[in-house]
């Protein structure tokens, strides 16, 4: 499956953005989907995950309460709605997929257990 993230941009602190990730070339509804981000000089960091059917979600503590992951299987797209953005949210945001739901937080946060990394989208939050 190929994934393409979009929707990034420059936003002031406190603002909101909705990122999208469009999938092609696979059966999207079979995949659990996740969002990661990578700031300059830092490791890739888990942000959020959603189950294949959309009924289960999981968030990193850093974005919990400020972000919502959702998906539209009819459109082969997963979304990440972010609000109350902070300068530390500045990063390139990536989406990825996996066939099995994470066994726990460590599994969710391990980039090696996710696949099909596409081109990310840059989010810049100004103070």
Image: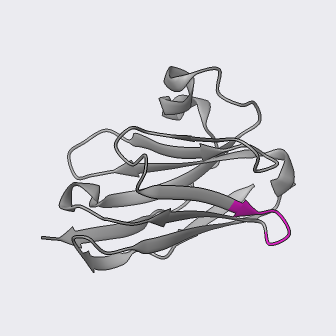
Vertical arrangement, residue 70 with respect to residue 12, above or below: above
53 with respect to 3 (left or right): right
Pick the residue in front: 78 or 27. 78
Pick the residue in front: 55 or 19. 55
Pick the residue in front: 109 or 50. 50
Q: Position of residue 50 (x, y in %)?
A: 66, 46
Q: Position of residue 75 (x, y in %)?
A: 80, 72
29 with respect to 80 (left or right): right
Mostly what secondary structure, the magenta segment?
loop
Q: Residue at x 23, y 61 (%)?
A: 86
Q: Residue furthest front?
A: 65
Image quarter for residue 122?
A: bottom left
82 with respect to 101 (left or right): left
Q: Which residues are magenta?
A: 71-75
1 with respect to 92 (left or right): right
Magenta region includes residue 74 = yes
Vertical arrangement, residue 115 with respect to residue 9, above or below: above
Vertical arrangement, residue 36 with respect to residue 7, above or below: above
Image quarter for residue 74?
A: bottom right
């Amino acid at each position: 499956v190929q994934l393409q993230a979009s929707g990034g941009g420059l936003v002031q602190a406190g603002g909101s953005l909705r990122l999208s990730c469009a999938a092609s070339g696979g059966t999207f509804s079979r995949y659990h989907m996740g969002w990661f981000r990578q700031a300059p000089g830092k490791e890739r960091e888990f942000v959020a995950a959603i189950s294949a059917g959309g009924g289960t979600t999981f968030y990193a503590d850093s974005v919990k309460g400020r972000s919502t992951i959702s998906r539209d299987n009819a459109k082969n797209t997963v979304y990440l709605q972010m609000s109350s953005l902070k300068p530390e949210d500045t990063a390139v945001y990536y989406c990825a997929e996996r066939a099995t739901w994470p066994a726990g937080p460590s599994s969710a946060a391990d980039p090696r257990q996710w696949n099909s990394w596409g081109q990310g989208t840059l989010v810049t939050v100004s103070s």
